[in-house]
Image (cartoon, rainbow, N blue to C red):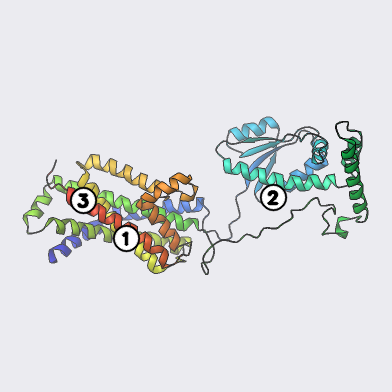
Amino acid sequence: MNAFFALVHKDLLQYLGNRRALLIGLLAPILIAAFFGSLFGGSGANSAPSRVPVGWVDPDPSPLSRRVALVLAQDPHIQLEPLSEADARKRVQEGKLRAALVLPPDFESHTVRALFGAAAPPQITCYSDPSQGATLALVKGVLTQHLMAEVSRVALDTQSASWLRLRDALSRDPRMAAEDRTDWQRLMDSAAQLQARHTAASAAPNSVLGGGGLRPPFSLQDREAVADGAGRGYNGYAHAFAGMGVQFILMLGVDLAVGLLLMRRQDLWKRLRAAPLSRGLLLGSRLLSTALIALGTFVVIMAVGIAVFGVRIQGSGLGFGLILVAFSLLTASFGLMVAALGRSPEATRGLAILATLLLVMLGGAWVPSVVFPDWMQTVTLLTPTRWAVDGLDAMTWRGQGLDAAWPVVGVLLGFSTLMAVVAWWRFDWEEA
Protein backbone atom coordinates (compact mmCIF):
# COMPACT_ATOMS: atom_id res chain seq x y z
CA MET A 1 0.00 0.00 0.00
CA ASN A 2 2.94 2.33 0.55
CA ALA A 3 3.82 2.00 -3.13
CA PHE A 4 0.18 2.58 -4.11
CA PHE A 5 -0.11 5.84 -2.17
CA ALA A 6 3.33 6.93 -3.35
CA LEU A 7 2.17 6.62 -6.96
CA VAL A 8 -0.99 8.57 -6.14
CA HIS A 9 1.03 11.28 -4.39
CA LYS A 10 3.35 11.54 -7.39
CA ASP A 11 0.44 12.04 -9.81
CA LEU A 12 -1.11 14.73 -7.60
CA LEU A 13 2.14 16.66 -7.28
CA GLN A 14 2.73 16.43 -11.02
CA TYR A 15 -0.74 17.82 -11.79
CA LEU A 16 -0.59 20.63 -9.24
CA GLY A 17 2.91 21.58 -10.32
CA ASN A 18 1.71 22.63 -13.78
CA ARG A 19 0.13 25.90 -12.67
CA ARG A 20 -0.70 27.17 -16.16
CA ALA A 21 -2.62 24.02 -17.05
CA LEU A 22 -4.31 24.06 -13.66
CA LEU A 23 -5.41 27.69 -14.08
CA ILE A 24 -6.76 27.08 -17.59
CA GLY A 25 -8.54 23.95 -16.44
CA LEU A 26 -10.39 25.95 -13.80
CA LEU A 27 -11.03 29.21 -15.67
CA ALA A 28 -12.34 27.69 -18.91
CA PRO A 29 -15.36 25.86 -17.41
CA ILE A 30 -16.18 28.79 -15.12
CA LEU A 31 -16.20 31.36 -17.93
CA ILE A 32 -18.17 29.16 -20.31
CA ALA A 33 -20.63 28.23 -17.56
CA ALA A 34 -21.15 31.93 -16.80
CA PHE A 35 -21.94 32.57 -20.47
CA PHE A 36 -24.40 29.68 -20.83
CA GLY A 37 -25.96 30.45 -17.46
CA SER A 38 -26.74 34.04 -18.42
CA LEU A 39 -28.03 32.83 -21.79
CA PHE A 40 -30.54 30.45 -20.19
CA GLY A 41 -32.06 32.68 -17.57
CA GLY A 42 -29.30 33.47 -15.08
CA SER A 43 -30.18 33.10 -11.43
CA GLY A 44 -33.86 33.72 -12.17
CA ALA A 45 -34.15 36.36 -9.45
CA ASN A 46 -35.80 39.65 -10.45
CA SER A 47 -35.11 38.99 -14.13
CA ALA A 48 -37.59 40.53 -16.56
CA PRO A 49 -38.53 38.46 -19.61
CA SER A 50 -36.79 39.35 -22.86
CA ARG A 51 -39.12 41.23 -25.17
CA VAL A 52 -39.56 39.78 -28.64
CA PRO A 53 -38.96 42.35 -31.44
CA VAL A 54 -41.96 42.30 -33.78
CA GLY A 55 -42.71 44.51 -36.80
CA TRP A 56 -46.15 46.11 -37.16
CA VAL A 57 -47.54 47.04 -40.59
CA ASP A 58 -50.84 48.93 -40.68
CA PRO A 59 -51.55 50.29 -44.19
CA ASP A 60 -55.05 51.50 -43.29
CA PRO A 61 -54.99 52.81 -39.70
CA SER A 62 -58.25 52.79 -37.77
CA PRO A 63 -59.23 53.31 -34.13
CA LEU A 64 -59.23 49.53 -33.66
CA SER A 65 -55.82 48.90 -35.24
CA ARG A 66 -54.28 51.82 -33.31
CA ARG A 67 -55.71 50.45 -30.07
CA VAL A 68 -54.36 46.95 -30.79
CA ALA A 69 -50.93 48.39 -31.57
CA LEU A 70 -51.01 50.34 -28.29
CA VAL A 71 -51.80 47.33 -26.10
CA LEU A 72 -49.26 45.17 -27.96
CA ALA A 73 -46.58 47.79 -27.37
CA GLN A 74 -47.42 47.74 -23.65
CA ASP A 75 -47.25 43.94 -23.42
CA PRO A 76 -44.15 42.84 -21.43
CA HIS A 77 -43.36 40.12 -23.98
CA ILE A 78 -43.51 42.18 -27.19
CA GLN A 79 -41.33 45.00 -28.51
CA LEU A 80 -43.42 46.48 -31.33
CA GLU A 81 -41.89 48.49 -34.17
CA PRO A 82 -44.11 50.16 -36.83
CA LEU A 83 -42.70 49.64 -40.33
CA SER A 84 -43.64 49.38 -43.97
CA GLU A 85 -44.29 45.88 -45.27
CA ALA A 86 -41.13 45.80 -47.37
CA ASP A 87 -38.93 46.96 -44.48
CA ALA A 88 -40.59 44.57 -42.04
CA ARG A 89 -40.10 41.56 -44.30
CA LYS A 90 -36.48 42.53 -44.97
CA ARG A 91 -35.69 42.89 -41.26
CA VAL A 92 -37.21 39.50 -40.50
CA GLN A 93 -35.09 37.95 -43.27
CA GLU A 94 -31.99 39.60 -41.79
CA GLY A 95 -32.79 38.24 -38.34
CA LYS A 96 -33.30 41.70 -36.82
CA LEU A 97 -36.97 40.94 -36.09
CA ARG A 98 -38.46 37.66 -34.93
CA ALA A 99 -41.74 38.27 -36.75
CA ALA A 100 -43.77 40.94 -38.54
CA LEU A 101 -47.56 41.34 -38.53
CA VAL A 102 -49.22 42.90 -41.60
CA LEU A 103 -52.84 44.05 -41.29
CA PRO A 104 -55.12 44.08 -44.36
CA PRO A 105 -56.94 47.20 -45.60
CA ASP A 106 -60.26 48.09 -43.91
CA PHE A 107 -59.24 45.89 -40.99
CA GLU A 108 -61.71 47.25 -38.45
CA SER A 109 -64.83 46.88 -40.56
CA HIS A 110 -64.07 43.36 -41.71
CA THR A 111 -62.97 42.19 -38.25
CA VAL A 112 -66.06 43.40 -36.44
CA ARG A 113 -68.38 41.93 -39.07
CA ALA A 114 -66.46 38.64 -39.01
CA LEU A 115 -66.98 38.42 -35.25
CA PHE A 116 -70.72 38.09 -35.88
CA GLY A 117 -70.37 35.88 -38.94
CA ALA A 118 -71.37 38.63 -41.34
CA ALA A 119 -68.12 38.53 -43.31
CA ALA A 120 -65.10 36.35 -43.92
CA PRO A 121 -62.34 36.87 -41.31
CA PRO A 122 -59.67 39.28 -42.55
CA GLN A 123 -56.28 37.70 -43.07
CA ILE A 124 -53.35 39.01 -41.06
CA THR A 125 -50.04 38.12 -42.68
CA CYS A 126 -47.30 37.04 -40.29
CA TYR A 127 -43.75 36.99 -41.59
CA SER A 128 -41.64 34.86 -39.28
CA ASP A 129 -38.05 33.79 -38.81
CA PRO A 130 -37.90 30.03 -39.68
CA SER A 131 -35.55 29.45 -36.74
CA GLN A 132 -38.00 30.92 -34.21
CA GLY A 133 -40.84 28.40 -34.03
CA ALA A 134 -41.46 28.89 -30.32
CA THR A 135 -41.37 32.67 -30.72
CA LEU A 136 -44.00 32.50 -33.48
CA ALA A 137 -46.37 30.65 -31.13
CA LEU A 138 -45.82 33.36 -28.48
CA VAL A 139 -46.55 36.17 -30.95
CA LYS A 140 -49.73 34.47 -32.17
CA GLY A 141 -50.94 33.90 -28.63
CA VAL A 142 -50.36 37.47 -27.49
CA LEU A 143 -51.93 38.88 -30.67
CA THR A 144 -55.03 36.68 -30.27
CA GLN A 145 -55.43 37.68 -26.62
CA HIS A 146 -55.34 41.43 -27.23
CA LEU A 147 -57.14 41.37 -30.57
CA MET A 148 -60.14 39.50 -29.17
CA ALA A 149 -60.44 41.96 -26.29
CA GLU A 150 -60.22 45.02 -28.53
CA VAL A 151 -62.47 43.70 -31.30
CA SER A 152 -65.17 42.73 -28.81
CA ARG A 153 -64.85 46.14 -27.17
CA VAL A 154 -65.50 47.89 -30.49
CA ALA A 155 -68.16 45.40 -31.57
CA LEU A 156 -70.13 45.84 -28.36
CA ASP A 157 -69.93 49.63 -28.39
CA THR A 158 -73.43 50.47 -29.63
CA GLN A 159 -72.46 54.10 -30.23
CA SER A 160 -69.54 53.36 -32.55
CA ALA A 161 -69.62 53.71 -36.32
CA SER A 162 -68.57 50.06 -36.64
CA TRP A 163 -71.63 48.98 -34.66
CA LEU A 164 -74.00 51.01 -36.85
CA ARG A 165 -72.40 49.71 -40.06
CA LEU A 166 -72.59 46.18 -38.77
CA ARG A 167 -76.26 46.48 -37.84
CA ASP A 168 -77.04 47.88 -41.24
CA ALA A 169 -75.04 45.15 -42.99
CA LEU A 170 -76.76 42.39 -41.02
CA SER A 171 -80.21 43.75 -41.80
CA ARG A 172 -79.48 43.69 -45.54
CA ASP A 173 -77.20 40.63 -45.90
CA PRO A 174 -78.87 38.36 -48.49
CA ARG A 175 -76.75 35.39 -47.45
CA MET A 176 -78.38 35.18 -44.02
CA ALA A 177 -81.63 33.36 -43.37
CA ALA A 178 -84.50 35.46 -42.08
CA GLU A 179 -84.48 33.62 -38.76
CA ASP A 180 -80.76 34.24 -38.28
CA ARG A 181 -81.17 37.90 -39.17
CA THR A 182 -83.94 38.28 -36.62
CA ASP A 183 -81.92 36.59 -33.88
CA TRP A 184 -78.86 38.76 -34.56
CA GLN A 185 -80.96 41.91 -34.40
CA ARG A 186 -82.44 40.78 -31.06
CA LEU A 187 -78.96 40.12 -29.73
CA MET A 188 -77.75 43.55 -30.81
CA ASP A 189 -80.83 45.24 -29.38
CA SER A 190 -80.23 43.48 -26.05
CA ALA A 191 -76.60 44.63 -26.04
CA ALA A 192 -77.71 48.19 -26.78
CA GLN A 193 -80.17 48.12 -23.90
CA LEU A 194 -77.56 46.75 -21.54
CA GLN A 195 -75.03 49.39 -22.49
CA ALA A 196 -77.61 52.12 -22.15
CA ARG A 197 -77.83 51.28 -18.45
CA HIS A 198 -74.05 51.68 -18.14
CA THR A 199 -73.18 55.01 -19.67
CA ALA A 200 -69.55 54.76 -18.64
CA ALA A 201 -67.26 51.79 -18.22
CA SER A 202 -66.29 53.02 -14.77
CA ALA A 203 -69.87 52.77 -13.62
CA ALA A 204 -69.78 49.00 -14.07
CA PRO A 205 -66.18 47.84 -13.80
CA ASN A 206 -67.19 44.19 -13.50
CA SER A 207 -69.61 44.20 -16.44
CA VAL A 208 -68.67 41.87 -19.28
CA LEU A 209 -70.07 44.38 -21.78
CA GLY A 210 -69.04 47.47 -19.85
CA GLY A 211 -66.93 49.04 -22.57
CA GLY A 212 -63.79 46.99 -22.04
CA GLY A 213 -64.53 44.13 -24.40
CA LEU A 214 -64.92 40.48 -23.59
CA ARG A 215 -62.78 39.38 -20.68
CA PRO A 216 -61.25 35.90 -20.19
CA PRO A 217 -63.61 33.70 -18.15
CA PHE A 218 -60.72 32.57 -15.95
CA SER A 219 -57.47 33.74 -14.40
CA LEU A 220 -54.11 32.00 -14.22
CA GLN A 221 -51.89 31.90 -11.17
CA ASP A 222 -48.25 31.14 -12.00
CA ARG A 223 -46.54 28.96 -9.40
CA GLU A 224 -43.20 27.25 -9.80
CA ALA A 225 -43.35 23.52 -9.10
CA VAL A 226 -40.35 23.24 -6.77
CA ALA A 227 -39.82 21.29 -3.59
CA ASP A 228 -40.98 22.83 -0.33
CA GLY A 229 -38.34 25.15 1.04
CA ALA A 230 -36.36 25.10 -2.21
CA GLY A 231 -36.85 28.81 -2.81
CA ARG A 232 -36.99 30.10 -6.35
CA GLY A 233 -37.06 27.51 -9.14
CA TYR A 234 -34.93 27.26 -12.25
CA ASN A 235 -31.43 28.66 -12.03
CA GLY A 236 -29.63 28.84 -15.35
CA TYR A 237 -26.25 29.19 -13.66
CA ALA A 238 -26.78 26.00 -11.63
CA HIS A 239 -27.43 23.98 -14.77
CA ALA A 240 -24.59 25.64 -16.69
CA PHE A 241 -22.00 25.05 -13.97
CA ALA A 242 -23.10 21.43 -13.66
CA GLY A 243 -22.93 20.93 -17.43
CA MET A 244 -19.60 22.66 -17.97
CA GLY A 245 -18.18 20.90 -14.92
CA VAL A 246 -19.15 17.55 -16.41
CA GLN A 247 -17.60 18.47 -19.77
CA PHE A 248 -14.25 19.69 -18.49
CA ILE A 249 -13.93 16.97 -15.88
CA LEU A 250 -14.34 14.41 -18.66
CA MET A 251 -11.59 16.24 -20.51
CA LEU A 252 -9.35 15.38 -17.55
CA GLY A 253 -10.07 11.76 -18.34
CA VAL A 254 -8.88 12.34 -21.90
CA ASP A 255 -5.67 13.89 -20.58
CA LEU A 256 -5.20 10.83 -18.39
CA ALA A 257 -5.56 8.56 -21.39
CA VAL A 258 -3.04 10.50 -23.46
CA GLY A 259 -0.63 10.67 -20.51
CA LEU A 260 -0.75 6.90 -20.06
CA LEU A 261 -0.12 6.30 -23.74
CA LEU A 262 2.87 8.65 -23.63
CA MET A 263 4.23 6.79 -20.61
CA ARG A 264 3.83 3.52 -22.48
CA ARG A 265 5.65 4.94 -25.51
CA GLN A 266 8.54 6.03 -23.25
CA ASP A 267 8.72 2.57 -21.62
CA LEU A 268 7.91 4.04 -18.21
CA TRP A 269 5.34 1.34 -17.65
CA LYS A 270 7.97 -1.33 -18.31
CA ARG A 271 10.14 0.13 -15.56
CA LEU A 272 7.22 0.21 -13.16
CA ARG A 273 6.33 -3.37 -14.07
CA ALA A 274 9.88 -4.39 -13.33
CA ALA A 275 9.18 -3.42 -9.73
CA PRO A 276 7.07 -5.79 -7.63
CA LEU A 277 3.86 -3.98 -8.58
CA SER A 278 0.79 -5.64 -10.02
CA ARG A 279 -1.24 -4.39 -12.96
CA GLY A 280 -4.18 -3.70 -10.66
CA LEU A 281 -2.05 -1.61 -8.29
CA LEU A 282 -0.59 0.49 -11.11
CA LEU A 283 -3.91 1.15 -12.78
CA GLY A 284 -5.67 1.56 -9.44
CA SER A 285 -3.26 4.26 -8.29
CA ARG A 286 -3.76 6.12 -11.53
CA LEU A 287 -7.54 5.80 -11.17
CA LEU A 288 -7.50 7.15 -7.60
CA SER A 289 -5.22 10.09 -8.36
CA THR A 290 -7.31 11.10 -11.37
CA ALA A 291 -10.52 10.78 -9.36
CA LEU A 292 -9.08 13.01 -6.62
CA ILE A 293 -7.99 15.61 -9.16
CA ALA A 294 -11.39 15.50 -10.87
CA LEU A 295 -13.20 15.82 -7.55
CA GLY A 296 -11.09 18.76 -6.41
CA THR A 297 -11.56 20.54 -9.75
CA PHE A 298 -15.31 19.98 -9.74
CA VAL A 299 -15.59 21.25 -6.17
CA VAL A 300 -13.73 24.45 -7.08
CA ILE A 301 -15.95 25.00 -10.16
CA MET A 302 -19.15 24.60 -8.18
CA ALA A 303 -17.77 26.70 -5.31
CA VAL A 304 -17.25 29.60 -7.72
CA GLY A 305 -20.82 29.12 -8.99
CA ILE A 306 -22.10 29.26 -5.42
CA ALA A 307 -19.99 32.22 -4.31
CA VAL A 308 -20.24 34.41 -7.42
CA PHE A 309 -23.29 33.37 -9.44
CA GLY A 310 -25.84 32.51 -6.79
CA VAL A 311 -25.95 28.75 -7.33
CA ARG A 312 -27.56 27.08 -4.32
CA ILE A 313 -27.68 23.47 -3.18
CA GLN A 314 -31.40 23.52 -2.42
CA GLY A 315 -31.67 19.74 -2.19
CA SER A 316 -29.54 17.22 -0.32
CA GLY A 317 -25.99 18.37 0.35
CA LEU A 318 -24.95 14.76 0.97
CA GLY A 319 -26.53 13.69 -2.31
CA PHE A 320 -24.71 16.51 -4.11
CA GLY A 321 -21.37 15.37 -2.69
CA LEU A 322 -22.02 11.71 -3.52
CA ILE A 323 -22.80 12.58 -7.14
CA LEU A 324 -19.56 14.57 -7.42
CA VAL A 325 -17.58 11.64 -6.02
CA ALA A 326 -19.32 9.10 -8.29
CA PHE A 327 -18.75 11.22 -11.38
CA SER A 328 -15.10 11.74 -10.47
CA LEU A 329 -14.67 7.95 -10.33
CA LEU A 330 -16.45 7.70 -13.67
CA THR A 331 -14.03 10.20 -15.17
CA ALA A 332 -11.02 8.24 -13.98
CA SER A 333 -12.45 4.97 -15.27
CA PHE A 334 -13.31 6.61 -18.59
CA GLY A 335 -9.71 7.80 -18.98
CA LEU A 336 -8.32 4.34 -18.20
CA MET A 337 -10.66 2.71 -20.71
CA VAL A 338 -9.74 5.19 -23.45
CA ALA A 339 -6.04 4.55 -22.76
CA ALA A 340 -6.61 0.82 -22.89
CA LEU A 341 -8.41 0.99 -26.21
CA GLY A 342 -6.19 3.66 -27.79
CA ARG A 343 -3.23 2.80 -29.99
CA SER A 344 -1.31 6.07 -30.13
CA PRO A 345 -1.51 9.39 -28.22
CA GLU A 346 -2.25 11.38 -31.37
CA ALA A 347 -5.12 9.23 -32.67
CA THR A 348 -6.55 8.62 -29.22
CA ARG A 349 -6.77 12.31 -28.34
CA GLY A 350 -8.95 13.14 -31.35
CA LEU A 351 -11.28 10.16 -30.92
CA ALA A 352 -11.53 10.67 -27.16
CA ILE A 353 -12.41 14.34 -27.52
CA LEU A 354 -15.07 13.46 -30.09
CA ALA A 355 -16.53 10.83 -27.76
CA THR A 356 -16.47 13.29 -24.86
CA LEU A 357 -18.25 16.01 -26.80
CA LEU A 358 -20.93 13.55 -27.92
CA LEU A 359 -21.46 12.39 -24.34
CA VAL A 360 -21.67 15.97 -23.10
CA MET A 361 -24.04 17.04 -25.88
CA LEU A 362 -26.36 14.06 -25.39
CA GLY A 363 -26.20 14.47 -21.63
CA GLY A 364 -27.83 17.90 -21.75
CA ALA A 365 -24.76 19.76 -20.53
CA TRP A 366 -24.94 22.44 -23.22
CA VAL A 367 -28.72 22.86 -23.33
CA PRO A 368 -31.27 21.29 -20.94
CA SER A 369 -32.40 17.85 -22.08
CA VAL A 370 -36.04 18.93 -21.83
CA VAL A 371 -35.67 20.61 -25.23
CA PHE A 372 -34.67 17.30 -26.84
CA PRO A 373 -37.25 15.34 -28.89
CA ASP A 374 -39.05 12.66 -26.89
CA TRP A 375 -37.13 9.80 -28.50
CA MET A 376 -33.79 11.47 -27.78
CA GLN A 377 -34.71 12.08 -24.14
CA THR A 378 -35.26 8.33 -23.83
CA VAL A 379 -32.10 7.31 -25.68
CA THR A 380 -29.83 9.67 -23.75
CA LEU A 381 -30.69 7.88 -20.52
CA LEU A 382 -28.13 5.33 -21.73
CA THR A 383 -25.35 7.90 -21.28
CA PRO A 384 -23.77 8.53 -17.86
CA THR A 385 -23.50 12.25 -18.51
CA ARG A 386 -27.30 12.58 -18.71
CA TRP A 387 -27.60 11.00 -15.26
CA ALA A 388 -24.85 13.23 -13.86
CA VAL A 389 -26.31 16.50 -15.17
CA ASP A 390 -29.86 15.60 -14.14
CA GLY A 391 -28.62 14.52 -10.72
CA LEU A 392 -26.79 17.78 -10.11
CA ASP A 393 -29.85 19.72 -11.26
CA ALA A 394 -31.93 17.71 -8.80
CA MET A 395 -29.62 18.55 -5.91
CA THR A 396 -29.35 22.26 -6.78
CA TRP A 397 -32.27 24.18 -8.25
CA ARG A 398 -34.83 21.36 -8.22
CA GLY A 399 -34.40 20.93 -4.46
CA GLN A 400 -34.70 17.12 -4.45
CA GLY A 401 -33.78 14.96 -1.49
CA LEU A 402 -31.24 12.20 -0.97
CA ASP A 403 -33.60 9.58 -2.40
CA ALA A 404 -33.23 11.25 -5.82
CA ALA A 405 -29.42 11.01 -5.62
CA TRP A 406 -29.11 7.27 -4.99
CA PRO A 407 -30.21 6.13 -8.50
CA VAL A 408 -27.78 8.61 -10.06
CA VAL A 409 -24.90 7.44 -7.86
CA GLY A 410 -25.74 3.81 -8.63
CA VAL A 411 -25.76 4.34 -12.40
CA LEU A 412 -22.50 6.32 -12.35
CA LEU A 413 -20.76 3.70 -10.21
CA GLY A 414 -22.08 0.98 -12.53
CA PHE A 415 -20.61 2.72 -15.58
CA SER A 416 -17.37 3.28 -13.66
CA THR A 417 -17.05 -0.40 -12.79
CA LEU A 418 -17.72 -1.47 -16.37
CA MET A 419 -15.13 0.94 -17.77
CA ALA A 420 -12.54 -0.05 -15.16
CA VAL A 421 -12.98 -3.74 -15.98
CA VAL A 422 -12.55 -3.03 -19.70
CA ALA A 423 -9.44 -0.97 -18.97
CA TRP A 424 -7.86 -3.69 -16.82
CA TRP A 425 -8.68 -6.37 -19.41
CA ARG A 426 -7.56 -4.54 -22.57
CA PHE A 427 -4.61 -2.46 -21.40
CA ASP A 428 -1.53 -3.27 -23.45
CA TRP A 429 1.76 -2.69 -21.69
CA GLU A 430 3.76 -2.69 -24.90
CA GLU A 431 3.97 0.23 -27.36
CA ALA A 432 2.09 -0.65 -30.57
Label 2: which residue?
A: 75
Question: Which secondary structure, mark 2?
Answer: loop
Label 3: which residue?
A: 423
Q: Residue at x 78, y 32 (%)?
A: 105
The image position of residue 173, as x and y in percent, is 88, 33
Please name the amino acid that badge 1 sits on.
Answer: Ala
Q: CA distance from mark 3 to mark 2?
A: 59 Å
| Quadrant of the image containing the C terminus | top left
Nearer mark to the viewer, of 3 and 2: 3
The image position of residue 124, as x and y in percent, is 71, 35
- Residue 27 can be seen in this image: no
The image position of residue 262, as x and y in percent, is 18, 46
**Label 2, residues with CA under 10 Å away: few <14, some 14-19, many ≥20:** some
Circle count:
3
Question: Which secondary structure, mark 3?
Answer: helix
- Which one is nearer the viewer's eye here, 109 or 410? 410
Please name the amino acid that badge 2 sits on.
Answer: Asp
The image position of residue 19, as x and y in percent, is 28, 56
Q: Is residue 18 left or right of residue 229?
A: left
